[in-house]
Every structure is written in structure tokens, then in C-alpha cells.
Amino acid sequence: KTPDHHVPRDPRLIRLTGVHPFNVEAPLSDLYNEGFLTSPELFYVRNHGAVPEVKDEDIPDWEFTVEGLVENPLKLTLRELLAEYDQITCPITLVCAGNRRKEQNQVRKTKGFSWGAAGVSTALFTGVVMADVLKRAKPTKRARYVCMEGADKLPNGYYGTSVKLNWVMDPERGMMLAHMMNGEMLRPDHGKPLRVVIPGQIGGRSVKWLKKITITDVPSDNWYHIYDNRVLPTSVSPEESANNPAWWRDERYAIYDLSTNSAIAYPAHEEQLCVVGAPENYRVKGYAYGGGGRRVTRVEVSIDKGKTWRLGKIDYAEDRYREAGEHQLFGATLDMTWRESSFCWCFWNIDVPVAELKDAKDILVRAMDESMNVQPRDMYWSVLGMMNNPWYRITISHEN
Ligand code: MTE
């Protein structure tokens, strides 16, 4: 029995590490077929340790604190949080910084396990705007960082990390304390009963099973903040990084905003395409996302190894929620009207004439965001294997 044998899980999920802790992604085609919103069953999971067990009857009494550089420290139960603060619902895509790490491990082994391209999922999160809670706690003049800690006790202490206080206070960044996903209570793997959701940034900042918020004037000194979620210079080898802790202490290497990324869901990697009797066009499809609230503005596909690129069509399903305007959703206000930012993945497709595709051995995709950040041709290898976003490539073959 593993420590979280009590947690129900979907057999379709692909395990990326041993039996424990639980780290999984869905098969990419299944994830894509779910559409814009991922069901909780197929939502990727990244756990560093055992899932804290919370009985349903204890949920309203789940307690967390806001302390440190504040004039008014708070101790709130979930019941009080939900009674005293307005709630919102909005769609947010979470992405693990390790998404697509497998490709890095194939070039040179990193210290991380091999995510395919399905370490990304989207849900409608319901909860309280984090800024509203912090405003009541009244951060002092010296306050600069928001440190967060979960209830999962790990070999190096509780999981924790930090983000900048001015980001949390900025309504455009939409950082929230969520208790529901797609209209139902958070599942145990996703932070039941309360988690942080930091849109546009790597999933590692969205602390699950939230117990403690500490306002500080320096970034978090939690082990997981320092030794995880960083892109060290490419010259730093696993040995060098182990021998020289100074590399890890440099906050400049900590990752926050996601990088622009995309992947092809159809065809599948190494799929054999049958063009005999097929329609005139083959529809190549996949997802793309930007970082820090930046919208993906173009997706391009190449079937000649990057010599020429074709422009794909993009569906921004997120905008349908925005256009729907404010209304009640899951007992909260659907609130995106004050968010110019884009915090969700988009789906793209492009029809490629079969006559042209039949000679191709591979298909490439790259996305660009509104700041013209385009996915690079080359991989940036780093010791933790994070933020991998070069052109996504699949190989195909053809049935004669
Ligand atoms: N929070 C706690 N308390 N413990 C964790 O192990 N993992 C982080 C983050 N929050 C983690 C955590 C990482 S690395 C990611 S990518 C996201 O949670 C994953 O969220 P999910 O499992 O709901 O998809």
C-alpha cells in the first residue's frame, strides 16, 4: 500500500515515476480530445510526496494563516474564507515546468523524470482573489514576497515557494485561492480542500493543500523553492550543481512566467498515416500556450524541416467565457471582464494537402505570443530539464 492508497485515480493516466509519489499525464490524444476544459480524471498530477488525507467533515475547518510582515495577521478556516470574501470562477491553464522534459532527457539526462507534452491541463477554478485576503492582512512597507506552504510533509520539509507581492496584488494577474475545479470540490491530488492558483506561471508556484502564507522581504527559503523550478545555466552539470550549492541560491535562475510552447496531438508521434482513399487534406491539430498572461498570436507548422511555415487557425475558447460576461457560475461570479490577459491554452489546426504531406517524414510546430516571443529552434538544456520549448517535432511514416 502506498501512503495515498485512499486517493481514487484514473487508469488511463500514464505514470511517469514509480508507484509513489503520484506523477502522471494523460495520453496526449486523450488530453486533446477532452477539449478546452480537462476533466479532473485526466488533469495532470505533480506530487512531491503523499497526498494529505482530509475527511469531508473536516473540510470547513481547514485552517490557514497569513503572517510575517503584515499589520493584521490572519487565521482563517475555509468556512470563514468562503463566507467573508467574494468568489470568482475563471478558466486557467496549469502547466508543469517539466512539460516536454522527455526530449531533454533524450539529449542528456537531467535530474527530472520524463514528461511528455501532456503536463498541462485546464479547468474552471473557483475561489477567492488572493489580493483581497492580503489586503485585509495589510502588508507592511518592507513586504515584498508572498511565501506559501502546503500540508504535504516531504523529506526536506513542507512543500513551499514564493512569488512577488506586487504580482499577487495586481488584479490583472488573477492569482487566487481555489477550492473548486470545474464546479466540484478539488480532488485530493489537486489540493483538496484549498490550493493557490497562479495563472500564467509554472505550476510549481501553485501550492496545493495550502496551510500557511508568510509575507517576507526576501524570497522563500523553502528547500523546494531553492532546489526546484529553476533553469540553471546550461554549462552547470548534475555533478557541478550537486557540489556547488551556490548555483541554486541565485534567485535570477528561478522560473516564474511560462515560456511560449506548443505541441502536436494529431497525428501522434510515429503514427503511420494512411493516405490511400483519404480526404484531400489531413488536419494537423494541437495546443499552444503563452506565459505571463501573454496571448498566443500565431501557430505555424512546417513539413519541410523548418524551411517554410504554414499558418494555423487558432481557437481561443477562453474568449467565449470572457464574452459571456459576468454571471453566476458554480456559486461564484464568472469574472474575466477585468482580465485582458490570456491565462489559457488555445487549440490550433491546419489542413495540409495530403499530396504534400505524403513525402514528409516529420511535422514541426512553433507558436509565437503577443510580445513576439517565438519558440526557438534549439533546445536550452539545463540540469533540472525545465521550460523545454523548442519547435515541437513528430515523425510520421506512410502506409503505401
Ligand atoms: N503543492 C504542494 N503542496 N506539493 C506539491 O508537490 N507540486 C507543484 C504544485 N504545487 C506541489 C504543489 C507542482 S511542481 C506542480 S506542476 C503543480 O502543483 C501541479 O498541480 P496539479 O497536480 O494539480 O496538476
Image (cartoon, rainbow, N blue to C red):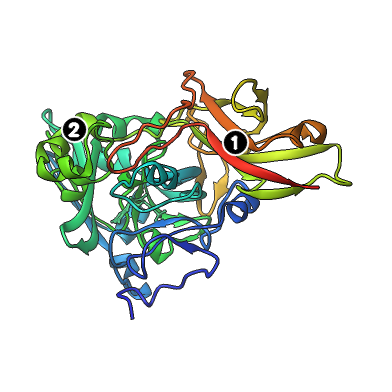
Mark 2 sits near ligand 1, with its Cβ under 8 Å away: no
Identified by mark 2, the residue type is Glu
Name the mark on residue 325: 1
Determine the residue positioned at 48% across, 36% down: 343
- Looking at the image, residue 65 sits to the left or right of residue 377; the answer is left
Residue at point 34% right, 73% down? 4
Q: Residue at x 30, y 31 (%)?
A: 167
Task: Give the amino acid type for the residue marked by disc 1 in the picture.
Answer: Gly
- Residue 148 visible, this angle: no
Q: Nearer the viewer, mark 1 or mark 2?
A: 2
Residue 368, horizontal then vertical, whole percent:
53, 24
Residue 272 coordinates in the image, percent (x, y): 70, 50
Depicted 376 relative to depicted 132: above or below: above
Quadrant into which the N terminus falls:
bottom left
Task: Give how far apart the Cα atoms at labels 1 and 2 are.
Answer: 39 Å
Please determine whether, in this image, residue 42 is positioned above or below residue 167. below
Viewed as shown, does residue 156 lie left or right of 37? left
Dot 1: element: loop
Q: Position of residue 122 (x, y in %)?
A: 51, 48
Would you call the spot at circle 2 few (<14 residues within 10 Å), some (14-19), or many (20 or more)? Answer: few
- 229 horizontally vs 65: left or right: right
- Asked whether residue 105 is in view, the answer is yes
| Residue that appears at 25% across and 37% down | 163
What residue is pinned by disc 2? 251
